[in-house]
Image (cartoon, rainbow, N blue to C red):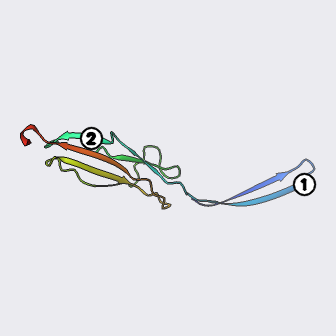
Amino acid sequence: MGTIYTTSHVQDGAGNESTCSTRWTVTDTVAPWIELVGPEEITLDAGSEFVDPGAMAHDLCMYAPGGSANITATGTVNTQVPGTYTLTYAVTDPSGNSAVPRTRTEKVLPTPWDT
């Protein structure tokens, strides 16, 4: 992103010359997008260990495919308490473009002795 200058110099067969300079301003107006690693919904039994598989951010201007950037994940999963939990992933690129947040749902099921 930023300003780039280019100069073109041409000469025809008769020796006539011309030079042209151009200033280009490159701006990033496209938001990154988030890809969940693994499924959008995870189901596990109460007392099981939960490891968040995470997410990846993609951006046409900043991040290589598969890059993780500075994704933030909000939410918690308490595997000791049956219920439905949501993790939300967000990212903003260096130009200030924010991705549409993505969510993952974790369902913690009661064990047979909990019922």
Give the number of marks: 2
Q: Nearer the viewer, mark 2 or mark 1?
A: 2
To which quarter of the image does residue 18 belong? bottom right
Residue at image position (58%, 59%) is 27
Q: Is residue 43 above or below residue 68?
A: above
Residue at image position (49%, 54%) is 31
Identify which residue, 74 or 17, lies in the foreground: 74
The location of residue 99, given as percent across then percent down, is: 44, 54
Q: Which amino acid does label 2 sit on?
A: Ile
Residue hosting label 2: 42
Label 2 close to label 1 by CB (< 8 Å): no
> In the drawing, does residue 8 fall left or right of residue 2?
right
Q: Determine whether the residue tagged by mark 1 lies in a helix, strand or loop.
A: loop
To which quarter of the image does residue 21 belong? bottom right
Considering every residue shown, the one lying at the far top of the view is 112
The quarter of the picture where the C terminus appears is top left
Considering every residue shown, the one lying at the far front of the view is 115
Q: In this view, does 66 lie above or below 96?
A: above
**Does residue 13 appear in the picture of this structure?**
yes
**Does residue 49 appear in the picture of this structure?**
no
The location of residue 7, given as percent across then percent down, is: 74, 57
The location of residue 41, given as percent across then percent down, is: 30, 41
Crowd tier of the residue under label 1, counting other residues whose Cα lies within 10 Å: few below 14, some 14–19, many 20 or above: few
Q: Determine whether the residue tagged by mark 2 lies in a helix, strand or loop.
A: strand
